[in-house]
Image (cartoon, coloured by chain):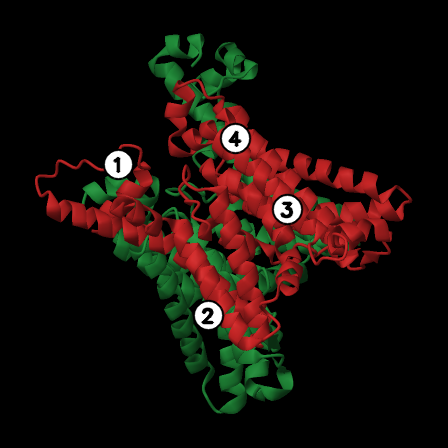
Amino acid sequence: MRQLFIKVVSRWETMLVLLILATVAWSTTLSPHFLTPDNLLRQTRAIVVIGLLALGLTLVVIAAEIDLSGEAILSVCAVTLGLLFEAGISVWVAALMSVVLGAVLGLVNGVLVGILNLPSLAVTLGTLIGYGGLAFVVLEQRPISGFPPSFTQLGMGTVGTTALQYSFLILLAFVVLVGAVLHLSTYGRRLYAIGHNKVAARLSGVPVTKMRVQVFVISGAFAGLGAVMLAARFGSVRADSGEGLILDVVAAVLLGGVSIFGGVGTIGGVFLALLLIGLLRNGMSLANIGGETQSIIIGVLLVAAVLIPLAVKKMTERLEASSTDAGSTGGDPTADPDQVEATQGAS
Amino acid sequence: MTQTAGERQAPGGLEGNVADEGEGDDGVLSSVRGALRGFREAGIIGFILLAIIVFTTQSPAFFTVGTLRSVLVNSSIVIVLAAGLTALVVARQIDISIGSTVALTAYVSAMVLSDFGDVPAVAVAGLAMALGAVLGLFNGVLVAILKVPAIIATLGTLFAYRGLVHVVAGGRQIGAAALPPEFRELSRTAWLGIPSLIWISLSIALVIGLALAYTRWGRDLYAIGSNPEAADYVGLRPQKLIIAAFVLMGAVAGLGGFLFLMRFTTVHSGSAWALEFEVVAAVVIGGVAIFGGSGRVFGAVLGAILLTMLGRGLILMHIPEFWKVVLTGAAIVGALAFDGLLERRRDLQLRRQRRPHLVEGGA
């Protein structure tokens, strides 16, 4: 019983829930209208686009890679969606094309990283810049708007007379889908295996190359879907539609407990982190804290999200070392060599 | 590693022989190739020459001393920053908070100059560098001591430092009118006919380049970058060295902020936005390997010059400036892919020399 208690308390997700409750309490003191079901449901639309990007990034990071290009892919897809719509193509076809285009742009990342074995950090930094420029080349600085109400309903509409957002339901559906794939299927388990140890995974028959390409394609497709939801929510698209999203997306994934070193993390954690970031931004707005100061705080959270698990790990290692000084503990056999190296270097 | 059909065919080809024998019997061609192979920056110099030829055929006005001067002036800030970033990248680190550091130091410099007009420019530059060094130290502590991966730490500070600029500047802008007249003239001064910005940037690049190549600190950074564990075993102190490299990057970015103000004489909270992208691009296309351990400041300087030249050439050819950003991204990816393919070929050749049967059989 006591062990179960410790297990629950020491879980990363428990800390997120506590942080969420604290944020809710803080926001309630700021405005009496905050803690109503209607308001809470209305706020959920703010995390839909970030959430979709974060789902894609989660898969990439669990496979021990990184994709910085999501926001730029989103911009290119949003611009393309707008131009196709302007050219008289049905907005629904344009939306579908947007997702396909996202997957194709993701495939470019995937081929460079998975097949040519280039470092994903540098590759996606390059495509972040390149795709970002491409969006401006295609649309320059004018906005496109005038989407039909049936389409914008997707981003702004609610179910019946409640405040439950369609867009949030869509996000939820994908959270459940990705969660199921990651935690219940062989595919998910193989992804963790790749993230833990690429070579061992390959030797155990996991199609490492193929899967590493696939996660980037999926990540790109989610960015394309994010573009659709963004166009539907704001009713307009611009070349800089995605600019600055990267901070919240990376913060949501890492704050969600997904290890930047790969192989660790849950979709539940990422979803809680999304809620936390959404509530936090909303609370800070209620407190009249400007968007730029909000960025400082999210930036600090991002760094803290990496720092805290490393610090906890170091502390527990020290505790173990002092309780059994014979050095027979040996450590976690599945631990990433980088992490082990990092903690050893620090002590 | 997966084998492709193309690679399996290679053993019978001419390429393998040339590389194996070095300055073999093929004469001039192979010795030229051998010389080029040892010279990392050959590729980028080739691209610069190509760009000059293309742009000159489009507009003869491109090939003049005036163009050279303006390209060097326009790339001067990126040159300084790229030299600093090279020291980090050879040690397998990265800093993407550069643009925010430049903006913050530029704005603080402008505040000092507009409030106390009689401060000597050198003192302001020193202050900017000191402030930048503090910001760099913070990055360095996060990465080297607290073990946050450099990309995540500096992504966080990219937004955090930019937020600080907004806190300090608000919606205000400090323009030329608020700056002392002597300061405004500074970027127009020249020595031996060469503008001050060029002198400053090239001398900073030279100092950092020499330090990386010939000091113990520099060589140790390469050692850390090419094999962190080995560097640890032989007794290097990676933490200290990496922090020093981040502090250097910060100080250089502070100087970049000062130069930014000197050159544009206007600064606001959005200044130097996304500047880090151009700096990273200059370093990567200059042949500084992102895996760490190789590359030189010289290459990064050439990278900065090539990027500026591309921008100028596009203007000459009336191509929208957004294309420059696309090309910058494409250049990074292209340079990486090129490096990766070279690496793979070298790897394969080495394996073939040692154990031919393994290559024949496939992995």
**Disc 3 designates what residue?**
A171
Q: What amino acid type is highlighted by mark number 4?
A: Arg
User: Percent position (x, y) of residue B339?
Assistant: 50, 35
Q: How far is the residue under mark 4 from the one under mark 2?
A: 41 Å
Q: Circle 1: is it few (<14), some (14-19), or many (20+) Cα within 10 Å? A: few
Q: Are marks 4 and 1 on the same chain?
A: yes
Chain shaded red: A
Answer few, some or many: residues within 10 Å of disc 3's Cα (few below 14, many 20 plus, some between 14 and 19): many
* Colour of chain B as rendered: green
| Residue identified by numbered label 4 | A212
Above or below: residue A124 compared with residue B339: below
Q: Which residue is mark 1?
A: A332
Closer to the camera: disc 4 or disc 2? 4
Whole-angstrom CA distance, mark 2 to mark 3, is 46 Å
* Residue B253 makes an appearance in the image: yes
Measure the alpha-carbon separation of dots 4 and 3: 24 Å
Whole-Å distance between the Cαs marked 3 and 1?
Answer: 35 Å
Categorize mark 4 by other alpha carbons within 10 Å: few (<14), some (14-19), many (20+).
many
Chain ID at mark 1? A
Tell me if label 1 and label 2 are in contact, CB under 8 Å: no
Q: CA distance from mark 1 to mark 2?
A: 46 Å
Helix, strand or loop at label 1? It is loop
Task: Please state the horizontal and vertical placement of residue B30, each as a whole percent of the image.
Answer: 49, 24
Residue depicted at x 42% and y 39%? A262
The amino acid pointed to by label 1 is: Asp
Residue underneath mark 2: B255
Is label 2 or label 3 in front?
A: 3
Q: Nearer the viewer, mark 4 or mark 1?
A: 1
Instruction: State which quarter of the image contains the C terminus of chain B.
Output: top left
Q: Nearer the viewer, mark 1 or mark 2?
A: 1
